[in-house]
Image (cartoon, grey):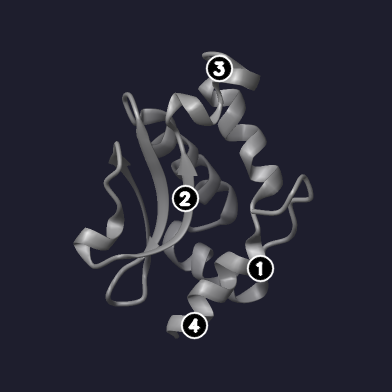
């Protein structure tokens, strides 16, 4: 994560997101819905599967995609401790604001490392 700077999605990652989700806006929409759909504590993930394709999923509590042999590329913590002090019970506001600090260079580097 960048500290309050956000950043831009690089070409390699952009190509992969468009291939998997049609366009970046659809990726954001699905990722947010998945994170917000997690009841209780857990995580939202962008992962790379064994075939190199991208998927979005959520896991409960401390579970993670590694147990299913998926490579985590990006994760959002949706446990209350991650957002409650600033956002109270407004998880959706937290998820929207979270995009501003994603380190897209790191995410793209994770994809490049496995290509």
Q: Quadrant of residue 97?
A: top right
User: Residue 101, image x and y in percent?
Assistant: 69, 47
Q: Residue at x 42, y 30 (%)?
A: 79
User: Residue 42, image x and y in percent?
Assistant: 35, 36
Give the Cα distance between marks 3 and 2: 19 Å
The tag on residue 75 is 2
Above or below residue 96? Residue 66 is below
Dot 3 or dot 2: first in sequence order is: 2
The tag on residue 105 is 1
Q: Residue at x 79, y 50 (%)?
A: 5
**Crowd rating for badge 2 (residues with CA inside 10 Å; few <14, some 14–19, many 20+):** many
Identify the secondary structure beneath mark 4: helix
Give the Cα distance between marks 4 and 1: 12 Å
The tag on residue 113 is 4
Give the Cα distance between marks 2 and 1: 14 Å
| Residue located beneath label 3 in the image | 90
Dot 2 or dot 1: first in sequence order is: 2
Above or below residue 103? Residue 5 is above
Dot 4 or dot 2: first in sequence order is: 2
Give the Cα distance between marks 4 and 2: 17 Å
Disc 4 and disc 2 in contact, CB within 8 angstroms: no
């Amino acid at each position: 994560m960048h500290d309050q700077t956000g950043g831009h999605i690089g070409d390699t990652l952009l190509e992969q997101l468009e291939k998997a989700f049609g366009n970046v806006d659809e990726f954001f929409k699905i990722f947010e819905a998945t994170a917000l759909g997690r009841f209780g504590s857990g995580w939202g993930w962008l992962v790379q599967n064994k075939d190199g394709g991208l998927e979005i999923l959520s896991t409960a509590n401390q579970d993670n995609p590694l147990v299913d042999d998926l490579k985590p590329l990006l994760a959002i913590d949706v446990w209350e401790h991650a957002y409650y002090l600033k956002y109270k019970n407004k998880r959706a506001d937290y998820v929207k604001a979270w995009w501003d600090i994603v380190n897209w260079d790191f995410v793209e580097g994770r994809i490049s490392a496995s290509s």
